[in-house]
Image (cartoon, rainbow, N blue to C red):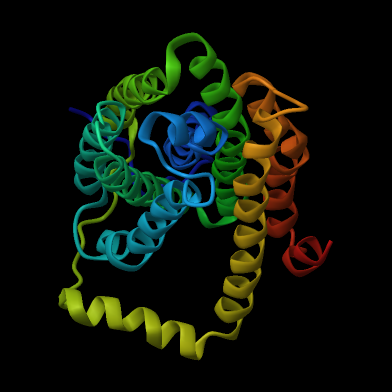
Amino acid sequence: MSLTSALPSADMPRSMVWLFATASGLSVANVYYAQPLLDALANDFGISHAAVGGVVTATQIGCALALLLVVPLGDKVDRRRLMAVQLIALVVALVSVSMAQSSSALLIGMLATGMLGTAMTQGLIAYAASAASPHEQGRVVGAAQGGVFTGLLLARVFAGGISDIAGWHGVYLCAAALMLMIALPLWWRLPALPAVTATMSYPRLIGSMLTLLRQEKVLQIRGVLALLMFASFNIFWSALVLPLSAPPFNFSHTAIGAFGLAGAAGALAAGRAGRWADRGYAQRTSAA
């Protein structure tokens, strides 16, 4: 098996940039498929409308666990092999959600899906940044982030449309199939990275994140901005679905999922923002 160089002297091929963007979008989409399906999940599992938001909460807890406990492993083990293990585990989690017979099994599956989907997404973005030449990191990471935004948008449209055709079970089976389809291109095309030489133990590695957060002002500011945007985003979607699916609207899952298209501007802007960052306008772009 031949692998491309980890430290390319030329620009990353466009096909590789597209692969990172596509894989990032498919990975993050798994975290958000449930949002337009909350009414169907509440009915099937006998969960009250007041409590069905726990399905979304479970995926978000998984996201937090991934960021704290799984993503840092990329600094300790081979990222390519780590990503392969995460992808296989994510497929298993998606299938388990589709086959859930109880609310507890559903929540466990959602937690695992949120954790593994987030770990895959963040791992791919870090991989793209490491594989890109310094002068094009903004472009490559911007493209991967554009894939993430596209995945966020289309996840709801996809989930709504498939649910109206094959039920919510079909949504997660299709999601598992999509991850299997992207697995081979990732395995064959991901560029090789230098061997990991870190000797830091896992507990010290986790603890080092707190040190970074305490010392790096930029990280503190960006972290707070991301927290506020993420909170607003999820509050909006958790509150949107139930009233739109009930009288007087009675919207289909497809129509509810289509509301996600309103954020298309964010996906289109991500790639451009990365190019502006490469030119030294990162602060102004963030402010705008």
Asked whether 237 or 269 is in front, the reply is 237
Quarter of the figure that contains the C terminus: bottom right
Residue 202 visible? The answer is: yes
- Above or below — where is 149 with respect to 118? above
- Above or below — where is 55 with respect to 1? below
- What residue sits 72% from the left and 64% below the top? 282
* Left or right placement of residue 283 versus residue 13 in this view: right
Asked whether 213 or 118 is in front, the reply is 118
* Left or right placement of residue 116 versus residue 14 in this view: left
- What residue sits 55% from the left and 53% below the top? 137
Question: Picture quarter containing residue 181?
Answer: top left
User: Which percent across, then down, holds residue 61?
Assistant: 39, 59
- Above or below — where is 271 with respect to 189? below
Quarter of the figure that contains the N terminus: top left
User: Which percent across, then down, holds residue 227?
Assistant: 59, 67
Asked whether 265 or 130 is in front, the reply is 265
